């Protein structure tokens, strides 16, 4: 390779650098062909143009001189990658933008030098392939490192936010919204506060990794609503989208964990939700925990009522447990439930109501479907019995 500029290449370089339409063509192509860049507003396009102008000048210089990217170039590329990680632009899209730019550069050179010598054409190809390979490696590495740092900081900020919510340090939804906005996150609303712990007598303090592992298992890919995890002694505390409560039982069951999921409190009452869930785990009898099922708001409120420190009025507890059974149209199901609990068996309850035993069992299945509580399960039957007893 020669260290002297090739005259034909230098002529093309000067012409292209002096022509603002080249940078405009690069920016236009990137904007049209890379969806992430098409979504950028006008405030971000000057930065794209500046990077395109710098890249154009550097690549043409390398072509003319048969040179290679220098340490200062690599530092700038790493800085660009770090900035893209910070603003959330995918690294794949960034690298595609550079490939699109390289294609435009080639077309612009061909338009100005239709009879380019073979050596010059080979030099252009070699330079572009080498530069794209180098910048891909440098930018991917820098992007991943920055993304990891940002994720670690974000996770810590979210964990501190959850800690404050559990401690009741936010007096209003407005104050919570302001803090969430500063972090650039959207908290789940409605939410599920899940407090969980491994089964077994010996439960040492939980490692944060175990809590985050549970969080990952419950996360929904692509969900834009933020979730977070922290620990309290031997327990994991997770703030999740409300829909996650339906999956919690299966995930915990697979890990031989037990838990309580509270979904009925507002965001400014996360501290109340945590106290309910933690107290429920402290006081629930062993037979209240079943594989594939977590304790719910209704279980927690019944346990609080039994412990003499109810967090809700009796009629509210009854509504939580009985749900649709409190509707006048479900009176026949309430009668079936009452007869079953009082009589002690489906056959005896059927005789009391002058029903066929199969009809009574069908009604019990409907009660299970409507309340997610099986009257044949000892703990769930107790909660149903308490609810129908304290119901006004």
Image: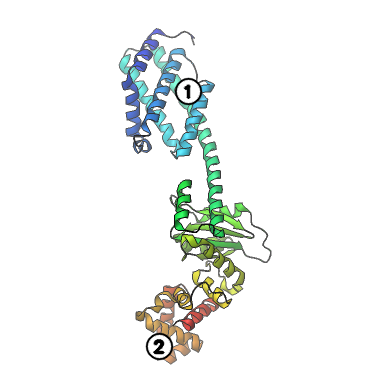
Is label 1 in contact with label 2 (beta carbons under 8 Å)? Answer: no
Local crowd size for mark 1, using a 10 Å CA cut-off: few (<14), some (14–19), many (≥20): some
Can residue 359 be spotted in the picture?
yes
Q: Which residue is mark 1?
A: 130
* In-front residue for pair 65/329: 329
Q: Is there any visible trace of residue 247 in the rendered image? A: no
Residue 29: percent from the left, percent from the top?
A: 33, 29
Q: Position of residue 267 (x, y in %)?
A: 47, 60
Q: Is residue 142 above or below residue 197?
A: above
Q: Residue at x 50, y 82 (%)?
A: 385
> Looking at the image, is mark 1 or mark 2 earlier in the sequence?
1
Quarter of image, res 303: bottom right
Q: Nearer the viewer, mark 1 or mark 2?
A: 1
SS at badge 1? helix
Query: In the image, 215: left or right of 60?
Result: right
Q: For residue 356, which numbered disc appears in the image?
A: 2
Q: Residue at x 37, y 27 (%)?
A: 49
From the viewer's perspective, tell me whether residue 115 is left or right of residue 129.
Answer: left
- Circle count: 2
Image location (x, y in percent) of residue 331? 38, 83
- In the rendered structure, the answer to whether residue 168 lies left or right of residue 23 reads right
Q: CA distance from mark 1 to mark 2?
A: 82 Å
What element does badge 2 sit on? loop
Residue 358 vs residue 43, the one in the foreground = 43
Picture layout, residue 178 above or below residue 2:
below
Give x and y (percent) for residue 227.
49, 53
Numbered circle sitting on residue 269: none
**Residue in the picture at 35% in, 16% down:** 18
Q: Residues within 10 Å of mark 2 (few under 14, many from 20)?
A: few
Q: Which scheme is used to colour this image of the protein?
A: rainbow
Left or right placement of residue 38 versus residue 261 in this view = left
């Amino acid at each position: 390779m020669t260290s002297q500029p090739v005259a034909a290449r230098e002529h093309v370089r000067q012409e292209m650098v002096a022509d603002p339409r080249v940078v405009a063509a690069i920016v236009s192509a990137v904007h049209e062909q890379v969806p992430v860049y098409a979504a950028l507003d006008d405030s971000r396009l000057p930065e794209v143009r500046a990077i395109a102008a710098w890249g154009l000048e550097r690549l043409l210089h390398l072509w003319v001189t048969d040179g290679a990217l220098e340490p200062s170039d690599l530092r700038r590329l790493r800085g660009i990658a770090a900035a893209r990680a910070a603003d959330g632009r995918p690294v794949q899209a960034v690298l595609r933008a550079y490939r699109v730019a390289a294609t435009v550069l080639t077309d612009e050179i061909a338009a100005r030098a239709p009879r380019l010598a073979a050596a010059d054409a080979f030099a252009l190809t070699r330079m572009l392939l080498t530069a794209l390979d180098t910048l891909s490696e440098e930018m991917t590495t820098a992007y991943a490192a920055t993304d990891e740092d940002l994720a670690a900081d974000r996770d810590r900020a979210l964990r501190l936010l959850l800690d404050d919510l559990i401690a009741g340090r936010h007096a209003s939804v407005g104050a919570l919204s302001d803090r969430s906005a500063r972090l650039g996150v959207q908290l789940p609303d409605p939410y599920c506060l899940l407090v969980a712990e491994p089964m077994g007598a010996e439960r040492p303090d939980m490692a944060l990794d175990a809590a985050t592992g549970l969080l990952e298992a419950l996360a929904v890919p692509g969900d834009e609503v933020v979730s977070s995890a922290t620990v309290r002694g031997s327990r994991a505390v997770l703030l999740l989208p409300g829909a996650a409560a339906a999956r919690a039982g299966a995930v915990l069951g697979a890990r031989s964990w037990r838990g309580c999921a509270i979904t009925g409190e507002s965001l400014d009452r996360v501290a109340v939700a945590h106290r309910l869930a933690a107290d429920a785990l402290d006081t629930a009898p062993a037979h209240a925990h079943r594989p594939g099922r977590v304790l719910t708001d209704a279980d927690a409120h019944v346990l609080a009522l039994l412990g003499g420190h109810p967090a809700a009025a009796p009629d509210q507890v009854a509504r939580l447990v009985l749900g649709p059974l409190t509707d006048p149209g479900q009176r026949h199901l309430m009668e079936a439930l009452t007869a079953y609990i009082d009589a002690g068996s489906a056959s005896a309850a059927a005789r009391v109501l002058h029903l066929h035993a199969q009809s009574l069992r069908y009604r019990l299945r409907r009660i299970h479907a409507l309340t997610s509580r099986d009257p044949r399960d000892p703990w769930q039957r107790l909660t149903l019995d308490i609810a129908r007893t304290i119901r006004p």
